[in-house]
Image (cartoon, rainbow, N blue to C red):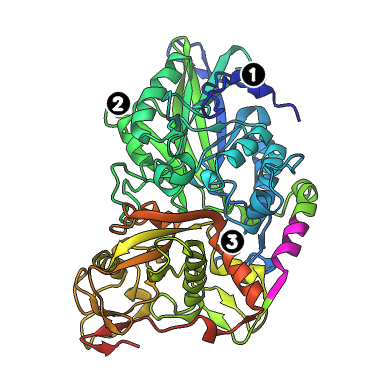
Amino acid sequence: MPLNRRKFLKRSAVTGAGVALAGGAAAPAARAASGAGASGRPAKRWSLTVMGTTDLHGHVFNWDYFKDAEYADGAGNAQGLARISTLVNQVREEKGRCNTLLIDAGDTIQGTPLTYYYAKVDPITAKGGPVHPMAQAMNAIGYDAVALGNHEFNYGIETLRKFEQQCDFPLLGANALDARTQKPAFPPYFMKKFHVHGAPPVTVAVLGLTNPGIAIWDKAYVQGKLTFPGLEEQAAKWVPKLRSMGADVVVVSAHSGTSGKSSYGDQLPWVEDAAANVARQVPGIDAILVGHAHLEIPELRVVNEKTGRTVVLSEPLCYAERLSLFDIELVFAKGRWEVESVAASLRNSNSVADDPRITRLLTDEHKKVVAYVNQVVGRATETLTTVDARYKDAPIIDLITKVQEDVVKSALAGTEYAALPVIAQASPFSRTSEIPAGDVTIRDLSSLYVYDNTLVAKLMTGAQVRAYLEYSAEYFAQTAVGAAVDVEKLTNANNRPDYNYDYVSGLAYDIDIAQPAGSRIRNLTFDGAALDDAQQFVLAVNNYRANGGGAFPYVASAKELWSESTEIRTRIAEWVTAKGVLDPKDFASVDWRLTRDGTPVF
């Protein structure tokens, strides 16, 4: 399909990146309202509605690929771009299409088996390969601009660039810079003129900002190619430029939350959830579409510290469950358009049906993925579940560590590190994953390992492993001896999510939750003897953790012995396929337990 917007881009020799975008098609004439101005003459007024989604994570349909059924939750939510399309059609009908914009705040091409399939199984990067389902859906719905999310980089720059080519809208990233030139590697902004009857046109600018954590989380893909400075500094650079270029309205699409904090202990020199900071610190912004945090924020008003003006923020719930609306009222005064008011609200995708146009468009792709995830790869001798895996050593997590150990041992065979003991890290990602007794399918295993992480081997000492375990144990709330244990309050202490709590296999240890954080690891042994702090180990660890995700001590700076690009999820499926039978006796072990003064909690 022709992508006329490409004429606005200049390409970087290093990354093939677009380094400027200064365009946007003019919209049809919109009708302006009139009212009495200060001079007594009628004042021209015009209304704009900016619609926004975020953190779609590959959700096109209201379908749970892991359960092979319509998506359902206790809150009655519905998911998918097919529902969003219906909401967007309604808003365009209400407001007039020429009075609306549709944008997104990132994390688009990762998160479901649908997106994995078209990145890895039938990749869009193959010669003559398919058009990505998310590009097809978002093109059909008519998105105007989309900010880059951190998960856009999970499959590498080649996949992201191919997706970009397939989109009829720009992917924005003002703070995604070419590492060599320090110029934008993606279009920083999108501008569009709206023609108003009887008045000058209204120029709307959308500035896209992404998450600096990409430099750590996807280090293997971006190191030496892209850099990601802070949102605040790049907004301060670009917003005045947009105003000087004639922008009457400036909207920021930011893949960043509002809390003003870094993520769950990621002790890094930037603030991850910086959207509210941008509103406070950078003058000239009217509204911010917020993403990344997976929260529902109908409207948040933040006062800019320099101008005293209010900036309106909104974050729609992830997975296409909500659509944000920014209703912006403008008045033409003193020869220019001025924003008179901004109000934000949400619309719920559970209130509408799928748009049949989107359903028809992607039915074939959906069916292919359903068939793929329902392939039987083995047979389980008993049911395995993660229901209590966050506070008990569960065999289903041991499956992950066993696979990782085996892969790394095989990779290091014949090297100088082959004789070192291999231990492995894994997290209880899901509280609802289950591998049922009987046939085991790809979707069963995919629900166990929901992220597209890959495997890395790191060289660690016993002392470093001990510190690693102490840090992990901060996940548990301190609970005195004799106090009642409420499992709902026992975990996630210090805002630590489940994915930042690690099992470590190959060792035996107690976690004494009666003790303060930092003094909880007891009876730590290896091969039946007290752990030697000088002993060297090979830690099989996922790339997120290996690159510093979660700020676990020592692992990011540890010597890397080996890494690969095959997903851990795929390695699990290969292991089960090779075994044929999934029997806990082949992988389960009791490595750790929770105690209080030596007495087991469970």
At label 2, the amino acid type is: Thr
- 3 or 2: tag closer to the N-terminus: 3
In the rendered structure, the answer to whether residue 70 lies left or right of residue 423 reads right
- 3 or 1: tag closer to the N-terminus: 1
Q: Secondary structure at mark 2?
A: loop
Q: Secondary structure at mark 3?
A: loop
- 2 or 1: tag closer to the N-terminus: 1
Q: Nearer the viewer, residue 576 or 203?
A: 576
In 3D space, how far apart are the residues under numbered discs 3 and 1 (Cα atoms)?
Answer: 41 Å
Q: Which residue is mark 1?
A: 7
Q: Is residue 553 above or below residue 145?
A: below
In 3D space, how far apart are the residues under numbered discs 2 and 1 (Cα atoms)?
Answer: 37 Å
| Residue occupying image coordinates x 69% and y 37% | 139
Q: Which residue is mark 2?
A: 307
Percent position of residue 351, x then y: 64, 55
Magenta-drawn segment: 366-377
Work out whether residue 70 can be spotted: yes
Q: Which residue is mark 3?
A: 77
The crowding category of the residue bearing disc 3, from other C-alpha atoms within 10 Å (few below 14, some 14 to 19, many at least 20), is some
Percent position of residue 121, x then y: 69, 54
For the N terminus, give its image quadrant: top right
| Residue occupying image coordinates x 71% and y 43% | 126
Residue 369 part of the magenta-drawn span: yes
For the C terminus, give its image quadrant: bottom left
Q: Nearer the viewer, residue 456 or 207?
A: 456
Residue 304 part of the magenta-drawn span: no
Nearer the camera: disc 2 or disc 1: 1
Q: Secondary structure at mark 1?
A: helix
Work out whether residue 76 can be spotted: no
